[in-house]
Amino acid sequence: MEQSDEKFGERADNRDRDRRLKSRLRPHAPLVATLALLFRRKCAGLRMLNVSSAREQGGSSCDVRGAALGKLSAGDKLGPDEAFDASAHAHQLQTMTSTMGIMTLSRGPCDLDNMSLFQDLKLKRRKVDSRCSSDGIMTLSRGPCDLDNMSLFQDLKLKRRKVDSRCSSDVRTHGRLSDLIAAGGRDREAPRGERPRCRSCGRSGSLRAPAARRRAPRTGKLSSRLFLVIRNPIPGDNYVINKQRQFYGVIGLSAVFAMALCDVCAARGTHHGAHNASGRRICAHVEPLSLSPRAPRRHISRSHLAPAASTATCTNPSAASGSAVSRPRPAPLAPRLLTAITPHGRESAADTSTSSPDPGPPSPRMAEAGCSTPPHPPPVFDGGGSPSPSPACHPTVIRSAPPYSVIKFEGAPGSVKAESSPASSKHDAAPPSQMSSVKLEGTQQESPQPYRPRTIAPPPPGSHSSLTPGPWPPSACINGVKPELIGGNFPPQPIEPKPGARGQTQWRGTPAVIMGESGGVRTMFWTLPAPTPSGEPAASASHTPTPPTPDPATCSEESAARLLLNLGGELRRPRGPPLNMELLWAGDVSQLPAHQQLHALNLSAAAGSVAGASSVASSSSLTLPRPELRTYAPETERDEDEQPMICMICEDKATGLHYGIITCEGCKGFFKRTVQNRRVYTCVADGGCEITKAQRNRCQYCRFKKCIEQGMVLQAVREDRMPGGRNSGAVYNLYKVKYKKHKKANKAATTTSRASPPEKPKEPLPPLPPHLVNGTILKTALTNPSEVVHLRARLESAVSSSRDRAVPLERALHMIRALIDCDAMEDIATVRHLPDLLHDTSEIGDKLCKIGDSIVHKMVAWTKQLPFIMEIPMEIHSKLLMEKWHEISVLTTAAYQAMHGKHAHAPPSSDHEQDFMQEVSASQVKITYWIDNQNYVFNGMHVQNSSSAQVELESIQDRYVQVLRSYLEHATPHHPGRLQELFARIPEIQAAANLLLESKMFYVPFVLNSAEIR
DNA sequence: TTAGCCTTGAGA
DNA sequence: TCTCAAGGCTAA
Ligand SMILES: [Zn+2]
Ligand SMILES: [Zn+2]
């Protein structure tokens, strides 16, 4: 307590601001002030859970959250403030993610969009098969849209070639805990020749021989086991399974580990706590969940795409048939089963499973065994081992005894499936994607939890770009907690493409290149091998289901890429002072170094050196909204038509637009050769070689790096090598520079009006900041367009790109209204039933938990209503919500205050125009800020979809800036600087948000708003 | 391997 | 028909 007081003593200035806040709070809600004081007084123990403080500590935010949550759930006695701090934040994040998952689930209509898009595209063989195929591929490789992908897969299964290749891509890239688990129980850390050791107690020798794992089905004995250990399960967390109890992941913040346990620990369902990070001895006994012998990996991928109907869990036919996703299910689906049976039952089940010699077909006996527990019991953790039947299949409740829950996983290859059981056959006609949620309830909590079971969606199973080669990218979390592989084998096995995918997965995915450091050498990795020169028939539809042999080269590339990504995870771009970014956003080009300004104007392609540039400025340059920069750029850029085009890579004389940017013939050819041949370069220096005409051949690595940085589009290099013609609109839409436009713009530059922002013909990307240029991860370039919806959005925007012309006022008003409607939800900026809450007799912590929970729900709901929700990858939405929720909440409450607060109408006015103006400004600034932060999130991901998603974000941001400009020009023609003024206020809002968060009073604006309207 | 020049072909 | 951005060719 004393230490915490000292810490607060160091924050005298913060306290002053807090005092001001409280002075505002005092007349309105005394109880709230009391709560705040209580917060302040008892703020010991837990560190801040916000991202910034987490980074200050040198750890990831997940780590901090996990630590706090671990403390919370470990049964420590926490003060109300601590409880709130941990649980509120945790559940906010958890709620966000889970709700985002719901959002993903509910995106049914986009399936149709996807389908129609594909149908349209297929009419053009060439586009579909070569140029656009990559677009479709990556569309399907996105994690956050798994259900969409799933449906798309089902619908387009006739196009086997594409489906198969993409499926394999999904297998490769989707981070899925169950995939990892299914990979088997080999302990990767155990040296060869040594017996594996129990990750819990350290015993060795009792683990089944890993080498025999894959041959296990005939023996009946499970050769190895990998256990899911839920360390410090968070009360209220949800575990997502499907009806076959196939484990999907965790909705929430419980850390799930895959461990190899000894038989003793496995039999007890306990974990001795050898790896308890906090040093606390952990021993919990839970009823083990046994995961049936796993299916072949290809089945896993398919089941992931379309989980089969439940077998025994679901007793609710209506629920089984009520899914919106009802599509034909591929026959060979064999999801792994997560069954809830007693240890005795498990053993018998394992024994009976031996009768199935074929790992593929289902085993009725096993299915029956799985159904044997009455009545169709869900996986149950009851802390004491007694299964508690659940009358309904959805959700399924798991009770556990914190702090450890162990889910037993039988890692043997699948000898058992469930389709042939009577129950399953009944449900076979049911929609495939019935998901069940498993809610983990802490036994130490007797009273109803402040956080109700949430509607569950599968967690984003690979919430990362398809670039990432393995299940667990460094940035991947299972809803807030980074999975940690303690036992097992990772990457477990080479990915087995689905039958028929042989030879077609190659280059069927969009090329992706990871540039970074491995073993101290700057090098690069292609995530996909080079295409076969011959190519395959475009419309090939017949496939031989011969399992392809894994490509060791690919595996090594994966591991290498994983290494790079893991290393790069340590070098997240630090969050720069937001002031610079916002000023740049507002058009303050002077913040940029001179050469960057020139860069932006393309009057001179600066060399790669960014020495001398401050990290702040450089950092800002990464997230610099180029549209705004373009808009506010001096008029001198229009003079460029008098000058010869300069290569944006080497400053040589450019010959035109090549692969998205203006380059010389040399750089054009260099880029083409590199992509076509998947060349791998290394840099003998630090990766910051200067690229000029004279020096461009000295370092291929840095030259190619610059190509990527400057925006050259990998997809523009045609897979089929067909000359002539034009690239597809999807590819073209990725271009930084539009063909023809850069000529027209030059000619018509002098006649361009201010209201009509000129199309910037030659606009290089700002160079990376030095710490990234010289960092471990230099650049991750992924040319995948993201999802089908994104592709469609791009195709549409290619037709009518709002950034090409001023937004008509009517359209601007329409778009503004749509934004305002996002804020029109009930209690968007207030606390519902505040009086009731204040008079509630519940504990303060519970009250604040409720408030925090409602705030989170509001933020999520707001996000879901955004008009461009479908145009941005869900992972960006999710991540942004997790990291920026406090800022957007302040923006929301500030907007509300402007409209409805006491000071909103200081001069009492009935001027609706004025009201609308305030509303417009608030909503527009908010949305622009939001999108710019998505840029931030995007840039921080490292696994970047640099050519597509970033363009998408810029396009959306530009769209709304144009809308606001258009409106302001109409509404305030006498005030031309209004736009800049609005954006200049953002740093203040940001600072306020951070202050509120740090002082744990982020709820205050909501409470104030509630108090004022009463 | 590079890069200058040529051919090609979709779209304006 | 023209444009221009693809790929191809080939001398250096
Ligand atoms: Zn060049
Ligand atoms: Zn170099």
Image (cartoon, coloured by chain):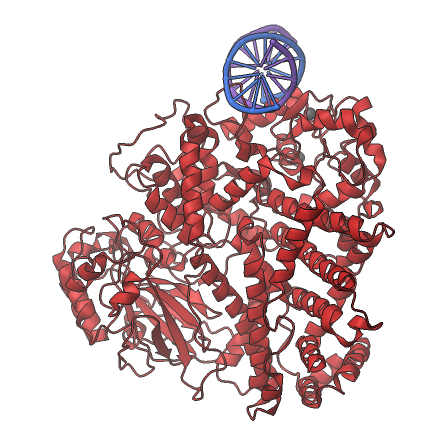
Chain colours: A red, B blue, C purple
Residue A929 in the figure: left or right of residue A588? left
The quadrant of the image that shows the N terminus of chain A is: bottom right
The relative height of residue A258 versus residue A1005 in the rendered view (above or below) is above
Q: Quadrant of the C terminus of chain A?
A: bottom right
Residue A302 in the image, given as x and y percentages of width and height: 32, 49
Indicate left or right for C4 with A503 as reference. Answer: right
* Foreground of the two, A628 or A183: A628
Task: Please say whether residue A774 is visible from this viewpoint.
Answer: no
Quarter of image, res A307:
bottom left
Q: Image point 55% across, 28% down: which residue?
A: A674
Which residue appears farthest toward the front when viewing the image?
A: A910
Residue pictured at 82% horizontal, 29% vertical: A750
The quadrant holding residue A46 is bottom right
- Residue A75 locus on image (x, y percent): 48, 84
Between A104 and A183, the residue placed more toward the observer is A104
From what the image shows, is residue A736 above or below residue A437? above
On the image, the x and y values in percent for residue B12 come to: 61, 23
Give the image quadrant in which the ligand numbered 1 is located: top right
Residue A166 in sight from this viewpoint: yes
Closer to the camera in the image, A214 or A375? A375
Task: Return the residue found at the far right.
Answer: A974
**How many tags in the picture?**
0
Nearer to us in this view, A770 or A210: A770
> Image height check: is A73 above or below A300?
below
Task: Give the residue displayed 26% in from the left and 34% down from the top.
Answer: A543
